[in-house]
Image: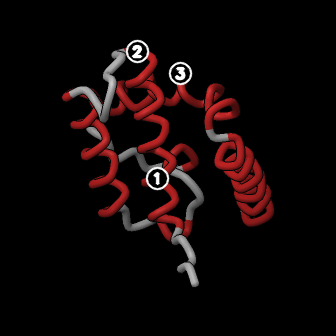
Amino acid sequence: MGTVETRREREKRVVSEMIALYCRKKHGPRRGLCPDCAALDAYARLRSEKCPFMETKTFCSNCRVHCYKPDMREKIRAVMRFSGPRMLLYHSVMAVRHVIERKREKKRMEANG
């Protein structure tokens, strides 16, 4: 019997998959991540782990508080711009779930705000 994945775990998994896809396509390592992408993945996981809002938001991309250092924020944005559309081809269930959850969160925010 499996455990229910928390939002925090899901966020870390999605971001890691996006970084892995970016790294494979942009940097071409045969296995794992290049050093720069490994550092970005570790940083993103740490930010997700320390986020005080994680359990009340769907994904970091929806957050109004940006806790990434400016240089890391630019790196993660490049990953998101590149990997976001490609997730439909490589991780379709994960991508569709992300879109549905973003729409739900947006409706919740509009209803409350």
The numbered disc on residue 26 is 2
**Residue 91, position in %: x, y?**
63, 40
> Mark 2: which secondary structure?
helix
Q: Secondary structure at mark 1?
A: helix
**Residue 5 on image: x %, y %:** 54, 71
Q: Amino acid at mark 1?
A: Arg
Residue 81 falls in image quadrant = top right
Name which quarter of the figure residue 78 lies in.
top left
Question: Which residue does the image show at 55% across and 69% down from the upper left?
Answer: 56
Q: Are marks 3 and 2 in contact (CB under 8 Å)?
A: yes
Q: Is residue 33 left or right of residue 96?
A: left
Q: State whether residue 53 is above or below residue 75.
A: below
N-terminal of the pair, mark 1 or mark 2, is 1
Q: Residue at x 25, y 26 (%)?
A: 34
Q: Is residue 70 left or right of residue 86?
A: left
Viewer-side residue, 93 vs 62: 93
Q: Which mark is residue 13?
A: 1
Residue 111 got which mark? none
Colour scheme of the rendered structure:
secondary structure
In the depicted structure, whether residue 49 falls above or below residue 38: below
On residue 82, which mark appears? 3
Circle nearer the viewer, 1 or 3: 1
Instruction: Tell me the quadrant of the picture where the N terminus can be found.
Output: bottom right
Instruction: Measure the C-alpha gap from mark 1 to mark 2.
Output: 20 Å
Where 55 falls versus 99 (above or below)?
below
Using the numbered discs, state the Cα–Cα distance from disc 1 to disc 3 in whole angstroms. 17 Å
In terms of sequence position, does the residue under pointer 3 or pointer 2 come before the other? 2
* Circle 3: residue type: Phe
